[in-house]
Amino acid sequence: MCARPYSMYDLKYNEEEVLKRSKKTRSVLIVAIILLVIGLGVLCYFSYNLYIDARSAGREVLQPPADLNVGKIDDIGVPKTIEFKKTTVPDLAALFGLGINEVEAKLGKGFKLTKSESVQDPGNPNITHLAVFTFTPELVDELDSGTIITYMPNESVYASLDQNGKVIDIYYTCDLRLLDVPLCSYEKLLSNDWLVLSTLQSAGITPLRYTYTAPVLEETIKYDNVNSENRKITKQTYIFSGRTTSQTLPTAWTLTVNYDYGSGVQSPDHYEKAIRVINLKLA
């Protein structure tokens, strides 16, 4: 039997079927593309959030819980300021004419003889012996176990004796942390005569016709490299001197006030970094 030939109706029917299938396929593709775009968008959104969260986590500073005792952390991580009991400049004038044992007894509790040796002093041939008495500072509070004191303030008396074993010259040095001297700038500390006169009075010295003049700030400053643009202040120092009213030794006094800044600071306003010391010479 021979197959029936295609008619115009058959061609039209086939064309409509193709069109229907094509539209359906396009619809499915469009829906698939839309879903794919949405999926990619969601994926990008969550990926971006994960990235931001990861970066934020790296920068975030953890805060202690509200119920945590922060004071305990401070005690461990931040060393407490070590405070020393205050002392006063001893009566140095009363040491003249005494022997070594008498000087130690006169200085009293806290001072110990730490050096005794024969010397020759080119500036004063009458000096034949040197005795050093060092004061041991007392702490205000006991230190925690394991605490290390990196710097111990010093107070010492250097007594120079003649061939008869009697004191004829005194050099005294003391860290201002041990004295009742306020922590302030060098300029402010020496803006009046309080430090000089109170030190002399405590040492048993009455200055003869002395008029105080405050030092010029720039004259007190020592630089690491005076010609450098980046120079640093390493020290501030100034010397006060005069005569005493005594007819016997000591008849002269010299007081030096030092602020030592170690490796240096840019400005004298950083006085809290200084080791502050006075040196008093009586002869």
Image: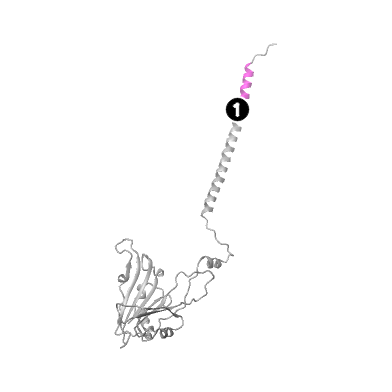
Q: Which residues are magenta?
A: 7-24
Q: How many marks?
A: 1
Image colouring: one colour
Q: Nearer the viewer, residue 77 or 187?
A: 77
Which residue was labeled with disc 1? 22
Front one among 113 and 192: 113
Q: Position of residue 44 (x, y in %)?
A: 55, 43
**Residue 274's quadrant in the figure?**
bottom left
Residue 105 screen position, x and y as percent: 43, 85
Asked if residue 81 lies left or right of residue 123, the reply is right
At 57% from the left and 43% from the top, the residue drawn is 43
Tell me the residue at 63%/21% (across/down): 14
Label 1 environment density (alpha carbons within 10 Å; few <14, some 14–19, many ≥20): few
Most foreground residue, 209 or 191:
209
In the image, residue 137 lies in the stretch drawn in magenta: no
Image quadrant containing the C terminus: bottom left
Q: Is residue 225 above or below residue 187?
A: above
Name the amino acid, label 1: Ser
Question: Does residue 196 sit above or below 268 in this rendering?
Answer: below
